[in-house]
Image (spheres, rainbow, N blue to C red):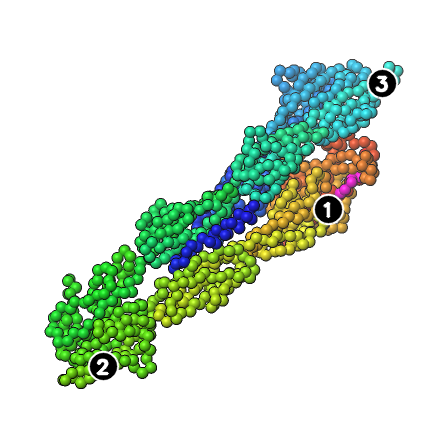
Amino acid sequence: MRYLLLIITLFITACGGGGGDETSTTPQEKLTHPGLIASDIRVDYSLDGNLTPTLSGTQGNISFSLADGAANDVVRINQNTLTILNVGKTKLIVTDSGNSQYKSTVTSFYVTIDKADRDPLLSNDYSYPYEAGAIHRVSVSGAKGKLLYELSSGYRNDVVKIDIAGELIVWGEGQTQVTVNDDGGRNYQSSESKFFITVEAANSQSATYQDITNKPLIFGGTILPVYSGSPTSEISFTIAENANPDVVSIHPTTGVMNIKGAGETEIVVSQTAEDNHQGIATQTFKVSVDKAANTSFKAGTLTTPYGFDDEPILQTSGAQGILTFEIIDGESTDVINFINSETGQYRFSGVGETKVKITDSGNTNYLSKTIVTDVKVERIQSAQLSPVDLESSYQENKVISAQVASRQGKLSFSLAKDSATDVVSIDSQSGEMTVLKPGKAEISVTDDGDLFYIPQTTSFFVTINKLVNNQFSVDDSRINNIANNTVFTPTPRNSQGTVTYSISANSTANVLTQDPTTKVITLTGAGRGWITATDHGNDYYHSQTTDFYVDVNYTASSLQADPIRTNYVADKLVSLPISGVVGQLSYKLDNGQPGDVVDINLVDLTATVKNAGHTTYIITDSGNEAVASTKIYLPITVEKAATNVDLTLKSTLIDTIYEEDKQLTSPAVSGKATESSIKYFVDYSDRQVVTVEPSSGALTIQGAGSAQVQVTEVSRNFENTTRNFTVNVGKAKHPGLTVAKQVPTASYYPGLEMAPAELANRFGELSYKFTYTEKPQTYELSQNGTLRVLKYPASRTNTYVRITATDDGGDDYLPSSVDYDIHVNPIEEGRGEQAVLTFDGNELPITSPIDVAAGDVTYFSASDSLSEAETMGGNVQKPGGYATQTVTVCNDPSVLSTCTLITVRLQNTSHCTDGSKIAYPVGAKIRYECPDLKQPIRSEVTMSFDRNDAFNASLSTGTYQSKEPITLVHFAKPYRSGGVIEAGDIQPRAWWLIKVNLTQD
């Protein structure tokens, strides 16, 4: 359909030149940008979330920057997208470079990031035997920010005393409740949880265990058994036979459970009685973990231009189950329609707005969730409407046709608001203008855009020039025997307005005088006087001047004739300056002189101009009885006229689409003078768009663009007359950019760079952008298409990135794009690491060999293919903090059923010259400096194992090996000791592979 519209548009605009006349075109300057619109963005925080600004009215290349004084820690600006950093509000500037038709422009928009929803806190009820003054510590799982513990209002305050950090002192027997509040840190909503603490005397010989219900789903979160009484010293816990093994893992002796998923399971508790005591029956209790609300499931508002035959996919993120897309009842079904209700693939139906309901069915761990998003399909920004300014000579009721290129819909015409109204009248539908009088008018033209394009209005000028009165003349005069001070009265011919006279500077002195007030000319002496006559014209004719002479003699003379010099005007009458005639006159051509310059009439003493040229006649006076026959020579020169005003081109615009070596025919030429030839010329000073055969005018397309073709008539009677027409060659449809050779898969290592795919059918400059990647912060894409892999993608994400390569088409083709995928395999040994280390559970110090400039930002990262190190607490920059890394370990790495999870800690320490140390979590971006701005001696990362961390308390006895190594990377700018700072951004400088091999007793 869109190609049919394009063909119709080209046909109409190519035929819009109208009838043949001498109308010419004038070049146009760059226009003011029609307007760039950027919509404000407001979304909830998501870790490393990706935002794409919505822009309309773009004309050139787009770039973003922070406004002066705007917050710089809310979003990070990438090549085409924004990455969420923190909650807050900031202001961005967007710049459009413009194009060959429009100037550049800037605008601004705000980005607001609100606090995100989060999972609830996971807390446990605690039971303690009464022991006055005993100190215990309680904890919760799933914290996002700073925690505050306090006794719940209305509950006993004499059972325990608790501080804000969760440390409590046993005070008495009984039960009370504790409220813990998580402020959510900067980026998350706050959350609150309550739990009971029971203190009772150790007066029973065994414990009674209770069901645990409605615990929130926090992966790896800790659940403690709930009981009354006192457990025996020998006790064991196990998951009941046929119970769900995917809800929790449990330590066999402590009963500490770590959450694995949602659902319900059953735990068997076996207590062994003391010697000489009655046996204790086996107990069971249930543990249920609720499905979590999927707070990550999102779909942004979609605003997109109408896509004709495109079949895009409505994008979502964070889905856990099967998706269902449908238009909400009562909303418009004429905007888009879904061709696959599960993938969200749709076709365009029209322009407008609607609402789409998207349902995620959820899974075993997440509830179903339905969201509603707005979809707005806008009209397309079409190519700029390009009318041509017109200029023509006045001719009564002459019809001129508007010449407009790049139309998309129906055109309408009118006189512009401040335009003169008496120059032309215009037909509002056809654009045909009828000439009324000379002047300049401004015409407004509107393209309604049809169904799918944005309407646009522009204007062009029509200039109607006054006529040149080439017929105006004044007869030369010869006056004999005139007394001094005789008033001279000239005789003008064919004047159009008031005629005034002035004595020419070429006039012989003392022949003529002119009164400065009355302007009367008086004959004052003998000789030749030259007078300039000016016809001041009228509304339809320009002012015109001509010179004539007056020969003054005191006495009669013999036959005389002065040379005649005049300009060519067909059939113009010129007086013969012959005097002293006493008899009958006759004439003949001098030997070899042309006879087609003028026709002589001795009766009226006139010559009629026939052609330009020079000739000489012999004039003979027969004389009388007193005067003998006399012959004189009469030279006559007819100069070429200025231009041939009748020379006309049938059209002054050829509008077509680029096709290599395509042949075009120049517009037909009419009104040619006799004995003339036509020559064609193209100015190649800018760019060769077409070539022209000088004699025939045959055109050959060389490239897209606009070219002026000069048409020159060379004739006998006119000076070279030039007309111009414009050849607009639009860019051709691209044959399609294709992938000639895919990028080979490579194994990851920090700083891995992968060249772009080899492409075919390229005609211009290539640009690259991400089409799809779940974690754009994992990659950097350079302008030349080189992909730099910063870290290996984490768990449950695809290990590939999709890139869109775009060929701008160069000078002759429209842009074309193609997508290709780049796959990355896990890291392998021998790829440049500093060392392969083994962590056995004891502290493992790792010293970095690289130099870092004092004050430069530096940091470490730790990750494997399933997860990466996470900082504990809400402030990753807090000194003394540490990061945790979840590691999959197995008794036998080849047998998946022997695998479980453990947690290791990683901390970055800067060693100072004064012996002090500054520690931060791995992942914290720090300034590499010690007190007094001194440079540290070295950087060191320490890996350790703490049994209180997630999963560690439930680790069974045995030897465990990691399924894959942890990759530890040190990031910093290039630097060499001695203060030499090399050019470059922060980059991987060194890395290590760390294998876990520990034994649990």
Q: Which residue is drawn at 41% across and 46% down?
A: 429
Give the quadrant of residue 466.
bottom left
Q: State the quadrant of the N terminus.
A: top right
Horizontal side, residue 501 vs residue 441: left or right? left
Badge 1 crowding class, 10 Å Cα cut-off, few under 14, some 14 to 19, many 20 or more, is: some
Q: Can residue 218 be seen in this view?
A: no
- Report the amino acid beneath label 1: Asn
Q: Nearer the viewer, mark 1 or mark 3?
A: 1
Q: Is residue 132 magenta?
A: no
Q: Which of marks 2 and 1 is in front?
A: 2
Q: Earlier in the sequence, mark 2 or mark 1?
A: 2
Residue 12 location (% of width, % of height): 48, 51
Disc 3 marks which residue? 273
Disc 2 marks which residue? 620
Residue 82 location (% of width, % of height): 57, 42
Q: Which of marks 3 and 2 is nearer the N terminus?
A: 3
Q: How far apart are marks 3 and 2 (CA)?
A: 162 Å
Q: Earlier in the sequence, mark 1 or mark 3?
A: 3
Give, as a single range, the part of the protein colored magenta: 960-965
- Say above or below: 843 vs 744: above
User: Which mark identifies residue 825?
Assistant: 1
User: Which mark identifies residue 915?
Assistant: none
